[in-house]
Image (spheres, helix red, strand yellow):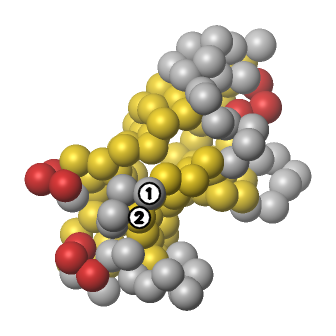
Amino acid sequence: QVQLVQSGGGLVQSGGSLRLSCTASGSVSTIYAMAWHRQRPGKQRELVAALTRTGRTNYAGAVKGRFTISRDSAKNTMYLQMNSLKPEDTAVYYCAATLRSDRPYDYWGQGTQVTVSS
């Protein structure tokens, strides 16, 4: 089992920056990949960025070049640095983890609101 606890988020003006954190506990060594998802108002949840345990990253086209996913293995913590934020980035952001490459993300954080004002 893996537990994920998020922090960060809040209200920022367009063009600003925020950093989200996600700290994992439990069977951390079994995690294959972690990711950030978001759910914008009236939209389905979507993948924002993912990071495998080998360091491979993947970004949604809408955030590529503005968002950076990273981790601090010593702290069991994953980050999402969000720069040049736009109002359309407003969403509830969730971190997630999967233990296998062929499995969906089974473990989820509690979610955190990010609001970007214009």
The answer to whether 6 appears left or right of 67 in the picture is: left
Answer with left or right where residue 89 lies relative to residue 11: right
Depicted 22 relative to depicted 114: above or below? below
Quadrant for residue 53, please give it: bottom left
Could you tell whether 87 is left or right of 75 in the image?
right
Q: Residue 83's x, y, as percent?
A: 55, 22
Compute the Cα span from label 2 to label 1.
5 Å
Q: Residue 42: where, in percent of width, then height?
A: 87, 52
Foreground residue, 35 or 111? 35
At horizontal 37% and vertical 44% (from top left) the residue drawn is: 70
User: Given contact means CB atoms under 8 Å apart, are the residues at marks 2 and 1 in contact?
Assistant: yes
Tag 2: Cα neighbours inside 10 Å, few (<14), some, or many (≥20)? Answer: some
Instruction: Pick out the residue farthest to the right.
Output: 42
From this view, report whether residue 52 is shown above or below residue 42.
below
Q: Which residue is mark 1?
A: 56
View extreme (left): residue: 74
